[in-house]
């Protein structure tokens, strides 16, 4: 594989796409994905935020920088071990492409060699069964107890490995200007607990506090309406 000549991606069809990146198969090795920041995202961001454009030292590559740092943090926990943590996407390096700098990552593939389904795909197609539910609990236990920082624990960012475990393929790191969670394990856990709760709500595993609060509000409104009705009836009776 030639890692020095810039890759030509603009004529290829992306195999994956989220809010921020375009994901391509590496032309020389289908086990490798090439992630670039979507040029449309850059354009939109720059138009909206001139300050962002001028001041950010790492600019639009911040998402890559965050992923890299968490990748290294997880490796630091197990020095000397060759295989990276099974729960986060393996990063292979940074290369140049005709769409800008790109992150090379190991693809999570299904048994047929296609991109593995995400947790969202499993849920939406009714394939989120006993095995993947148990694997999700194992993943969430790891997410909570490990030192990694997480900012976007959405169902799109968890790929289902055919071995039966989930791999976080995006959403690692801290987006905050002052990254206090990196120095406070307590705050980090607190934040991750919230993210885990939100993920459970997203995939319908738990009633969200939002929904239960809404239910309480509706119940109070009904009780008040009933009390109002009784009061008017009493008034009519006493007249
Ligand atoms: N390592 C990977 N293995 C398998 N699929 C991946 C991998 N990385 C990304 N994808 C696919 O590409 C999509 C978009 O990638 P992602 O890195 O999440 O971009 P974005 O930042 O735009 O959300 C994912 O939802 C997933 O379907
Ligand atoms: Mg994503």
Image (cartoon, helix red, strand yellow):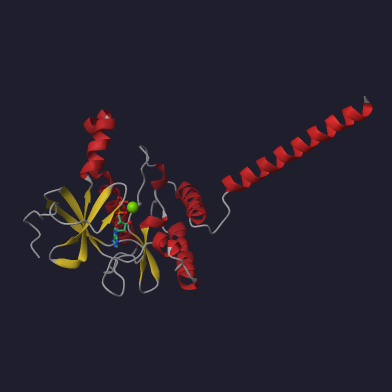
> In the drawing, does residue 36 fall left or right of residue 132?
left
Residue 213, by quadrant, is top right
Judge whether 25 appears above or below 60 on screen.
Answer: below
> Horizontal and vertical percent for residue 164?
40, 72
| Residue that extends furthest to the top in the rendered view of this protein | 239
Q: Quadrant of the C terminus?
A: top right
> Horizontal and vertical percent for residue 182?
39, 47
Judge whether 51 appears above or below 141 on screen.
Answer: above
| Residue that extends furthest to the left in the rendered view of this protein | 5
> In the drawing, does residue 43 fall left or right of residue 201?
left
Q: Is residue 119 visible?
A: yes
Judge whether 28 appears above or below 171 on screen.
Answer: below
Q: Quadrant of the N terminus?
A: bottom left
Q: Residue at x 11, y 49 (%)?
A: 98
> In the drawing, does residue 39 fall left or right of residue 187?
left
Q: Residue at x 27, y 44 (%)?
A: 62
Q: How many marks?
A: 0
143 or 215: nearer the eye?
215
> Horizontal and vertical percent for residue 23?
24, 55
Q: Is residue 183 visible?
A: no
> In the drawing, does residue 173 fall left or right of residue 214?
left
> Horizontal and vertical percent for residue 102?
18, 52
Judge whether 96 appears above or below 175 on screen.
Answer: below
2 or 118: nearer the eye?
118
């Amino acid at each position: 594989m030639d890692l020095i000549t810039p890759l030509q991606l603009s004529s290829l069809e992306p195999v994956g796409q989220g809010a921020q990146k375009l994901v391509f198969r590496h032309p020389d090795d289908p086990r490798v994905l090439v992630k670039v920041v979507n040029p449309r995202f850059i354009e939109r961001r720059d138009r909206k935020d001139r300050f962002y454009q001028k001041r950010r030292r790492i600019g639009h590559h911040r998402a890559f920088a965050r992923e890299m740092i968490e990748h290294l943090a997880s490796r630091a926990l197990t020095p000397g071990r060759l295989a990276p943590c099974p729960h986060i996407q393996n990063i292979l390096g940074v290369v140049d492409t005709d769409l800008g700098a790109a992150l090379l990552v190991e693809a999570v593939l299904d048994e047929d060699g296609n991109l593995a389904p995400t947790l969202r795909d499993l849920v939406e197609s009714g394939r989120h069964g006993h095995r993947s539910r148990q694997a999700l609990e194992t993943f969430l236990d790891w997410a909570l107890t490990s030192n990694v920082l997480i900012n976007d624990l959405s169902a799109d960012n968890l790929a289902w490995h055919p071995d039966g475990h989930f791999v976080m393929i995006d959403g690692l790191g801290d987006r905050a200007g002052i990254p206090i969670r990196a120095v406070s394990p307590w705050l980090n856990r607190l934040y991750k607990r919230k993210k885990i709760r939100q993920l459970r709500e997203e995939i319908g595993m738990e009633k969200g506090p939002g929904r239960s609060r809404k239910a309480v509000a509706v119940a109070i409104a009904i009780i008040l309406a009933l009390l109002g009705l009784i009061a008017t009836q009493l008034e009519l009776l006493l007249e």
